[in-house]
Image (cartoon, grey):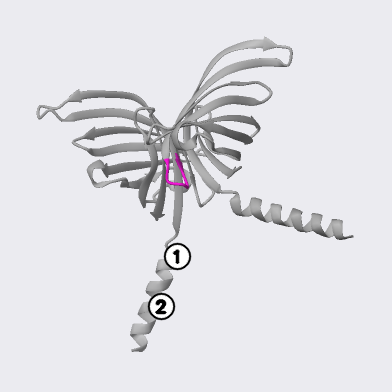
Amino acid sequence: MKFIKILLILCCTLFYAKLVLAEDFTITQSIKWIMGSEIETSSGKLRGVSVEGAYIDSRGHKGTITCIGSVGENFKADCNLKDEDGDFVYLDALRKGVDGVSKMSGGTGKYENVTADCIYQIANTNKAASLGLVTVQCSSN
Amino acid sequence: MRLFIISVFILLLAGIANADYTMKSVYKFDNVDMIKNMDDSNILNLTVNGFQEDSNGNNATSKCLINLINSVLNGNCQGTDQDGDIEYSTVERDLSKGNVGTIIRKGGTGKYANKTSVCEYTVVLTDFKIGVGYLTASCKE
């Protein structure tokens, strides 16, 4: 019984520490994209896409976003954010429909050991003009 | 005294009836071209393709033809909403005075026929090199 009590206290402490340490921030991106060539794969058609845009985040940073990816059953891409100081954040993106997930896995300068899990939504999009507004919510690990 | 109170009440009601709405727009720059003016300043012409959404539940694809002379931006826009109704507007901003400008709806078709509005807009993020931007606006009809 005593062991369970200690375990519960430990779990509560870890949960609380996680809540305190988790730094939440948001990113707003204005993006445009260019579709590339298309190939047949075992899981259907896959088309290359390159994305460029500008972003601003709730931590006070702003800069540009660049992604190289593919669109098939899902949208998958590898991206980087380059901020006003020239520091990079490396991230990926995976989306099916309007909602997606993204993982930040370090970078350069101030982002060297920064990792975060994010969810994102395509808030507004004009497919004919190949542009969209993306809102991202992140939780630092 | 009674007349004064009634007048204030009527003015207050009129103010409430005069519907306010907000708007946000994501956009990209196309067909950017530039020449020099005789005073060595830049004269720029560009097309801005965008997608806008307002708090009245309307969303529209828009196209603006913009010219920029001596940091003063002027242009004419046409937006077509989800019902096929068209709104015609003008845009102006002095870039040397910051990121705030004015969009004036002159009228249009359908729900915009004889409906004018004045919006003060703020450019939230933009990157001219990449050619994208995002603005929010507060409007009065």
Residues indicated by labels 1 and 2 sit on the same polypeptide chain: yes
Amino acid type assigned to the residue bearing label 1 in the image:
Ala
Q: Look at the numbered disc 2 and give the secondary structure of its residue.
A: helix
Q: Which residues are magenta?
A: A56-61
Is A131 positioned to the left or the right of A99 in the image?
left
Which image quarter: residue B6?
Answer: bottom left
Q: Residue at x 29, y 37 (%)?
A: B75
Q: Which residue is mark 1?
A: B17
Q: Residue at x 31, y 28 (%)?
A: B46
Q: Is residue B56 magenta?
A: no
Which image quarter: residue A48?
Answer: top right
**Chain letter belonging to callout 2:** B
Horizontal and vertical percent for residue A107? 50, 31
Q: Which residue is mark 2?
A: B9
Which image quarter: residue A119?
Answer: top right
Horizontal and vertical percent for residue A136? 55, 41
The Cα–Cα distance between marks 1 and 2, rounded to whole angstroms, is 12 Å
**Chain letter belonging to callout 1:** B
Q: Residue at x 58, y 25 (%)?
A: A77
Is B106 positioned to the left or the right of A43 in the image?
left
Residue A2 vertical position relative to residue A77 in the rendered view, above or below: below
Residue A116 vertical position relative to residue B4 in the rendered view, above or below: above
